[in-house]
Image (cartoon, grey):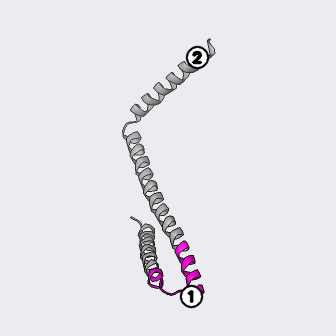
Amino acid sequence: MSRAEIARERVFDNLKVLAGDVEELVKATAEQTDDGVSSLRERIRQTLETAKSTLTQGVRGRKMLKTSQQGAEAAMSFAQDNPWTIAGVATGAAMVFLCLLWSRFTR
């Protein structure tokens, strides 16, 4: 894991902790009924929900990116280890495609 990835993980973890702390603060001030405090509490709650959603999407996106990178690396490794197999599969797929095209145009 690179330094940038480690730093990114720390930022996401810190943001999760911050979101939890802010949520606790909003709950702790729930008894105060001043209009300004109520308005502020509602804005904070909405911002917190948006931030949680964004963090969740970011985590999913990173997992998907990591999985796709691992798949690409595995495919490249397989192709480098088995070049003739790849050539055979590509040739077979091209032949099937050409047969389908030929049958369509010969009707």
Asked whether, in this view, residue 12 is left or right of residue 35, the answer is left
Residue at image point 48% right, 81% down: 26
Sequence-wise first label, 1 or 2: 1
Residues 92 and 10: in front is 10
List the single residue furthest toward the top: 107
Q: What percent of the width, then of the height, locates residue 5? A: 43, 67
Q: Secondary structure at mark 1?
A: loop
Question: Which mark is drawn over residue 34?
Answer: 1
Residue at image point 46% right, 25% down: 92
Q: What percent of the width, then of the height, locates residue 1? A: 38, 64
Three-letter residue code for mark 1 = Asp
Q: What percent of the width, then of the height, locates residue 27? A: 45, 80
Residues 84 and 18: in front is 18
Asked whether, in this view, residue 17 is left or right of residue 40, the answer is left
| Quadrant housing residue 42 | bottom right
**Label 2, residues with CA under 10 Å away: few <14, some 14-19, many ≥20:** few
Residue 61 painted magenta: no
User: For the magenta stretch, what is the residue range?
Assistant: 25-46
User: What is the quadrant of the C terminus in the image?
Assistant: top right
Residue at image point 43% right, 28% down: 88
Q: Which residue is mark 2?
A: 102
Main SS of the magenta part reads helix
Question: Which mark is drawn over residue 56?
Answer: none
**Label 1, residues with CA under 10 Å away: few <14, some 14-19, many ≥20:** few
Q: Nearer the viewer, mark 1 or mark 2?
A: 1
Residue 35 painted magenta: yes
Q: What percent of the width, then of the height, locates residue 58? A: 48, 63
